[in-house]
Amino acid sequence: GNSVTQMEGPVTLSEEAFLTINCTYTATGYPSLFWYVQYPGEGLQLLLKATKADDKGSNKGFEATYRKETTSFHLEKGSVQVSDSAVYFCALKGTGFQKLVFGTGTRLLVSP
Amino acid sequence: DTAVSQTPKYLVTQMGNDKSIKCEQNLGHDTMYWYKQDSKKFLKIMFSYNNKELIINETVPNRFSPKSPDKAHLNLHINSLELGDSAVYFCASSQEAGSGNTIYFGEGSWLTVV
């Protein structure tokens, strides 16, 4: 079945550092890929998505490119802020009535 | 306006009790979901409904029973609560169930069973 693997956290960075959170997936067909973010004590918010190979999703300075050849969807940001501290989830959804499958989440801690 | 709203946000209850969590979406979506997030933040789908019809039913104890009175509502009823049911329960919705359609989540219901 479909699955998503994320790097273990926590990821600890200083403000203005470069961020990469790795995400790889296993899926049949042509799934869509998502990054969701969960701030402390809050629900899940869509951060960005990509629906086909080579698409780049971007939002709030975050980017991720759908790489079919490496089955990856790594999240990047050039300069993180303290307010980016949260848990980031990579997710995948296949076609039709298929469930959204999440990775285990990566906690990001940004210090001033 | 809240797109996906669920109540209550916090719920503390004793083992053996029966409780319900209500969910409503005002996005006009056809598909609604319940996800469970455990203490390690792992998210797993429990149920999915499309136009009031159950389409995904993961391996969940039959103490959990979803009910969809109309396509804008998907409530979760839990009988005989156990300690292991303590978790955050997220309601969500999407326009149809296509792969590219974004799933929008509610703010979660924090359930603690004591």
Image (spheres, coloured by chain):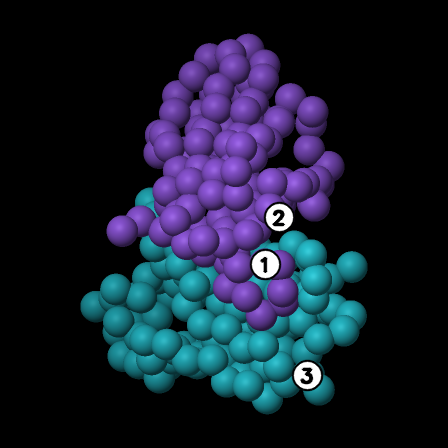
Chain colours: A cyan, B purple
What chain does mark 3 sit on?
A: A
Residue B44 pos. (x, y %): 61, 46
Classify residue A103 by image quadrant. Answer: bottom right
For discs 3 and 2, the disc positioned in front in the rendered view? 2
Report if residue A19 is visible in the image: yes
Q: What's the CA distance linking mark 1 and mark 2? A: 7 Å
Determine which residue is flagged by label 1. Answer: B96
The circle on residue B112 is none
Amino acid beneath label 2:
Asn
Amino acid beneath label 1:
Glu
Q: Choose the circle earlier in sequence order: 1 or 2.
A: 2
Residue B87 pos. (x, y %): 49, 34
Q: At 41% across and 54% down in the image, what residue appears? A: B27
Amino acid beneath label 3:
Lys
Residue B84 pos. (x, y %): 58, 26
- Is B56 on the left or on the right of A82, as rendered? right
As drawn, the residue found furthest toward the left would be A112
Q: At 44% across and 32% down in the image, what residue appears? A: B22
Q: Secondary structure at mark 1?
A: loop
Q: Are marks 1 and 2 in contact (CB under 8 Å)?
A: yes
Depth order, front residue of B98/A111: B98
Determine which residue is flagged by label 3. Answer: A68
Q: What's the CA distance linking mark 1 and mark 3? A: 25 Å
Q: At 56% across and 22% down in the image, what residue appears? A: B78
Report if residue B43 is visible in the image: no
Q: Are marks 1 and 3 on the same chain?
A: no
Q: Are marks 1 and 2 on the same chain?
A: yes
Q: Are marks 1 and 3 in contact (CB under 8 Å)?
A: no
The circle on residue B50 is 2
